[in-house]
Amino acid sequence: MVLSNGALKVVALGGGHGLAASLSALRPVTDDLTAVVCVSDDGGSSGRLRQQFPVVPPGDLRMALAALCGDDEWGATWARVLQHRFVSTGDLNGHALGNLLITALWQETGSVVEGLEWVAGLLGAKGRVLPVSLEPLEIFADVRDSGGVLRRVEGQVEVATTTDEILSIGLNPANPDACPEALEAVNTADVVVLGPGSWFTSVLTHFQVPQMSRALHETPGKRVLVLNLNAQTGETSGYSPEQYLEVLATQYPEFRLDWVIADPGHVHDEEALRKVSAAIGANVFLAPVADFGEFSDKHDVEALTSAFSYVFSETGNSNVNDRRR
């Protein structure tokens, strides 16, 4: 049974498939849902469009909009159409229709936010989608290889696929302004959700936008992190669940969480996870949120909905660390 929180104001941050999973799970929980999306993608259709036009990459914004479509025939149809990719021998090959639609509305309206609102209205989206910044960003990472040699890799695709240890990340341009509407959403949220998703290139990127980082630190809302199920080949190869939190605590030592949601089948040292979580103020909620068992990289939407319903209804009592089902 899903516990509806009605007008509970929820903001979810991230990008790609991870954010889409959170949004799909959050739709049944609240009627007031906003997605804040990273805009540093430089691969595929999005990369080609940002090279041709002075726009933020639309791909992760498109995926968030598709996840917010309703479950009725209208919503399901538009979600498929938005995600449709052309297959041809011409210039359209590989482009997602939704990317083209979003870019067209940006040109028509002259506004990133207004264009996204028009797309959301067309789809009947059950929430709002905003970029973390109104300008396209490029992520870079300082890494260390197995021989101890330090170097810098640039671009989301390169950072996401590096086999070297990521020491820190940054953005070009440095210190970009945050989207004002996204700041307002985080500053007035009842709950802020981070993850799951590519740790450095989708989740932590938001902390590299100074105004957004400050908002995440100061928001009055409850902060909830959904841990990834498995390490991502490339940027987090070999990561244990607690390592994600250790990186968060090391790079942003003043940031605090209230809840960490993790799947017990993917946690191999529960004591270590609880210890690291407690150090940043968080309770751990272990719930079977993986789809198709412990080797799946996907979250089960219905199970994640139930997990969100539970932690949203809790007071944050430090004695309530777990509810196994």
Image (cartoon, rainbow, N blue to C red):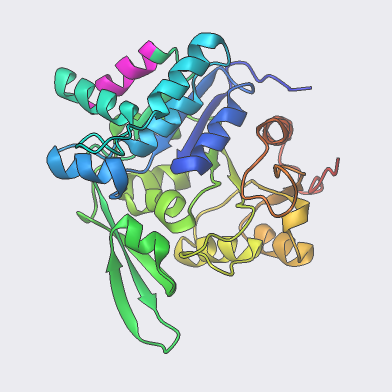
Quarter of image, res 30:
top right
Q: Residue at the location (69% across, 58% down)? A: 278
**Image check: 121 left or right of 320?**
left
Q: Is residue 243 left or right of residue 102?
A: right
Q: Is residue 219 visible?
A: no
Q: Is residue 110 left or right of residue 203?
A: left
Farthest right residue in view: 325
Q: Nearer the viewer, residue 308 or 122?
A: 122
Name the residue: 30% across, 31% down.
99
Q: Residue furthest front?
A: 89
Tell me, yes or no, whether the highlighted magenta stretch contains residue 117: yes
Query: Is residue 211 on the magenta stretch?
Result: no
- The image position of residue 285, as x and y in percent, is 74, 46
Q: Residue 111, located in which quarter of the rendered image?
A: top left
- Please provide percent x and percent y for residue 307: 72, 36
Up the image or down, 126 lies above or below 134; here it is above
* Up-down relation of residue 57 to residue 147 (above or below): above
For residue 300, above or below residue 43: above
Placement of the C terminus among the 4 image quadrants: top right
Residue at 58%, 23% in the rendered image: 27
Q: Nearer the viewer, residue 312 or 109?
A: 109
- Kindly tell me whether residue 193 is visible in this rendering: yes
Residue at left offset 60%, top offset 52%: 228
Where does residue 61 sit, x and y in percent of width and height?
A: 37, 33
Q: Which residues are magenta?
A: 112-122
Q: Quadrant of the N terminus?
A: top right
312 sits to left or right of 110: right
Give the residue furthest to the bottom: 147
The secondary structure making up most of the magenta span is helix
Number of marks in the rendered image: 0
